[in-house]
Image: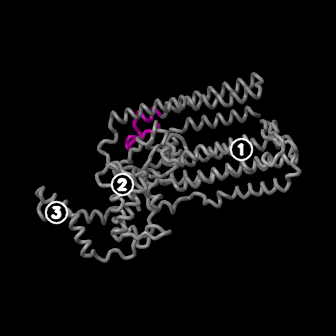
Amino acid sequence: MYIQIEPESDIPIYSQVSTQVMEGIIRGELAAGEVLPSVRGLASDLGVNMHTINKSYHDLEAKGVITIVPKSGAVISVAPLKGASKEQTDLLSEKLRPTVVEAMVSGMNDDEIHALVDSIMRNVREMK
Amino acid sequence: MEGIILFLSTLIVSVIQVSIPFLVKRTVVFGVTVPMDHTNHAVIKQSKKRYSLITGVLSLGVLTTFLVWSMSTTPTDVQMALMGTILPMIVIVTSLVLYFYFHVKISKLKKEQSWFEGKKQVKISDLNIRAKDEMLPWYVVSLPILLTIGLMAFTAANYNQFPDQIPVHWGADGQPDAYTDKSVLSVFSLPIILLVLQGMFLGIIELTKRSGIKIRPTNNQASKKRQINLRKYTSWLLLLVSLLLTMLFSFLQAMTLYGNMFGDMMIMLVPLIFMFLTLAGAVVFAIKVGKVDSDLDEVVVTGQDDKVEEYDEDRYWIGGMIYFNKQDPSVLVEKRFGIGMTVNFARPMAYMVLVVPILLILLLSFL
């Protein structure tokens, strides 16, 4: 599977990499047990700083998406998708809030916001 | 005989110089990143043709002059060596001047017409690409080192039989023409130099292996193939040169020990064959790497997503030729104008690659 990053984007590169890995898992392109490239390998392939990829892998590990196994590397977790915990839901709500607020204040109604979220989810699942 | 070597090597240098614009990555023109849909721009096509035409005509002139000169006069060895340095230099310097002229020209055009405007510049990477890497493993690349150790054992076993005067330089006819007194160092100098060179090759291959496999979003299949080929054939070429050097050095060492046991003809031919095979290897390397994702590649995949472009990396390339990128952990990257690898000057390791082998060889020759 491909990782695509936009260096000039406002979204930090580490977060772009994390999101792409998670999208790969959702689409089934990355299966449980698969090993991600080494930090140095992915950083050299993309021509970005090793700290950036390191940060991204630790971010993914904190989210429970991958496990960093000494010697093997970053392994996609075996059963990460058993539903979000209470704390995780709270965290997501906190992160989503500014975006939802921005949408509401711009005058979008509930249906439009729901439709937007639906379209993003469709896009994530279908993108190749 | 020297004339033939000089003529052949100048010819090959010229042919490669003339064809470079058509062998490099399609989206880098004279060291300038160009969006995929502008690679067929009239000015770009014209610049490439002019570059090749001028270097081509100049090379022909130089080669003809050389032929006429070497046939009408009887040049001395010194004159021949001088010509052999000057001739390829004329071709290389002129093509460098032309390169910079077109580099500036295309850069200006790109800026004026803002070719990257409205394009989303992205970088991509294939997570599974390292499984498809076809570089030779380290133990295959290390095989010639075993031969060198064998040569050292052979030298040690026959140390007493080596003559009092050890050759240190050989003429164009393959005959030794300079000697030094016998000592452990002088008897072992050939195998030691060989070992240093092989170690250097092994190091370059390992650094290549660790360097990034850089692919483009605008033609990911072709750019992937090119990178895989570049890495694979770099390791093959270095193994070939390493093996050839081992054979040549073993041949010279045996000649020092047993004297002229092979006959004058053989002694003249062996270095020539070595040189010819190395040049042939370099040409095959240039073709194998240069035919994919360049102007020679017939398959053009377009329309993947015309809003997306490869990231414009010109900011990391001084003059379009010298790579300096502090972020990139790669020590070796693909050259922008030429076929092969160049170093990332922002990495301290790059200076090791450039300086250490030279220092070692200098040290050995002064000891």
- Tell me which corner region of the image, top left, top right, bottom left or bottom right, holds residue B136: bottom right
For label 2, the SS is strand
Task: For mark 1, name the chain.
Answer: B
Residue B242 image point, x, y percent? 68, 51
Residues packed near mark 2 inside 10 Å, few (<14), some (14 to 19) or many (20 plus): many
Q: Which quarter of the picture shows residue B313?
A: top left
Q: Nearer the viewer, mark 2 or mark 1?
A: 1
Residue at position x 73%, y 28% in the image: B80
- Position of B268 with respect to A120 (left or right) is right
- Amino acid type assigned to the residue bearing label 3 in the image: Ile
Q: Do the residues labelled 2 and 1 touch (CB within 8 Å)?
A: no
Please check the rendered image and state whether residue B343 is part of the magenta-colored stretch, yes or no: no
Q: Is residue B41 magenta?
A: yes
Q: How far apart are marks 2 and 3 (CA)?
A: 26 Å
Segment colored magenta: B30-47
Q: Which amino acid does label 1 sit on?
A: Leu
Tell me if residue B244 can be seen: no
Where B366 falls versus A123 (above or below)? above
Chain containing the residue with disc 3: A
Specify the label residue B364 is tagged with: 1
Please identify, in this view, whether the residue under mark 2 or under mark 3 is nearer the observer. Answer: 2
Q: Which amino acid does label 2 sit on?
A: Ile
Residue at mark 2? A5
Residue indicated by mark 3: A113
Mark 1 → mark 3, Cα distance in angstroms: 74 Å
The reply to whether dot 2 and dot 3 touch (C-beta < 8 Å) is: no
Q: Are discs 1 and 3 both within one chain?
A: no
- Residue B152 seen anywhere in this rendered image of the structure: yes
